[in-house]
Amino acid sequence: MSAGRFAPSPSADLHIGNLRTAILAWLFARASGRRFLIRVDDLDDRTHTDIAHRQLDDLARIGLTWDEPPQWQTAHPGRYDNAVAQLADRGLLYECYCSRKDIAQAPRAPHAPQGAYPGTCRDLTDAERETRRAETGRPPALRLRTETVEYTVRDVLHGEYTGIVDDFVVRRGDGVAAYNLAVVVDDAEQDIDQVVRGDDLLPSSPRQAYLARLLGRREPTYAHVALVLNEDGARLAKRDGAITLAEIGVQRALTLIADSLGWQADNVDEMLAQFDPARLPREPWIFSP
Ligand code: GLU
């Protein structure tokens, strides 16, 4: 059955912007009759279980409900290994020995898009690969051999969005699944067909949708919602003052979020009654604690 989700990384307590995105994800799912799931994206933050539990508590305290116990990414590494093996069997992966610095300094074709992998390791001969392996002395990352340079996704708020699809990393040198692979595999395994998240991730969606298709999975519907920024136009951070639920308080946080969306509401059910995706603000919400 189809589902929407919110997938926080347990790197810090959720701030009012994250809570607003979580509420929007819940509203999109509930308003379209979908189930709603929470996933703890802990592949990169595996030691922060205390933060993850606080995040789950905060989501419950603002009134969100979910239909299955939250899944933790670190609980099922086999899921990612299977997808990597499937791609490897099809000859779609190659080893990459580049450091960030190598990539930044690599010569680029004149029209290569900014931020795209320059292809340094794509066509190495066996001998060159051996040399690179000996030179770097660290295990390689695995990159996807893509057949395109861009891909178009449909986003409820942004319409058709075309972005870069380069040879992106699917498994890091340390053996951990890369974010772009993990998110696609997890969403597919959980039958998630609606992805609502901050618009900082919009540029990642073409890579993810392309990979979903390669893996024979359906592409989700996307809704990338505007972020909450501070008065300087930067992302909210601790130094901005009171931004977490513990600091703001549940009731005030809910009122502020409702207000930022143009509604008068004290709880998420009242927000659901007023929810209309077509009328959501497209501009960032400037928050001053
Ligand atoms: N865990 C990611 C984050 O917190 C979001 C993953 C996603 O929504 O696709 O930035």
Image (tube, rainbow, N blue to C red):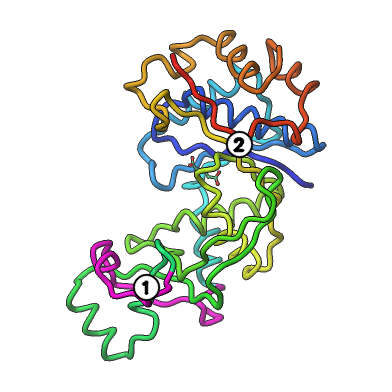
Residue 3 lies, in percent from the top left, at: 73, 43
214 and 266: which one is in front?
Answer: 266
Please report the residue visible at 63 percent of the width from the left and 68 percent of the height from the top. 215
- Dot 2: what SS? strand
**Residue 248 - label:** none
- The C terminus lies in which quarter of the figure? top left
Instruction: Tell me the amino acid under the disc marked 2.
Output: Ile
Residue 236, quarter of the rendered image: top left
In the image, the segment drawn in magenta is 86-112
- Residue 191 spot, x, y in % from top left: 71, 50
Amino acid type at circle 1 is Pro
For label 1, count other residues whose C-alpha is less than 10 Å away and answer few (under 14), some (14-19) or many (20+).
Answer: many
Marker count (numbered) = 2
Within 10 Å of disc 2 (Cα), the crowding (few <14, some 14-19, many 20+) is many
Q: Residue at x 37, y 27 (%)?
A: 237
Give x and y (percent) for residue 53.
48, 27
12 horizontally vs 225: left or right: left
Residue that sits furthest to the front in the current view? 110
Above or below residue 127? Residue 244 is: above
State the SS at label 1.
loop
The answer to whether residue 286 is magenta is no
Q: Which residue is mark 1?
A: 118
Q: Which residue is mark 2?
A: 38
The residue at 50%/29% (across/down) is 228
Residue 50 in view = no
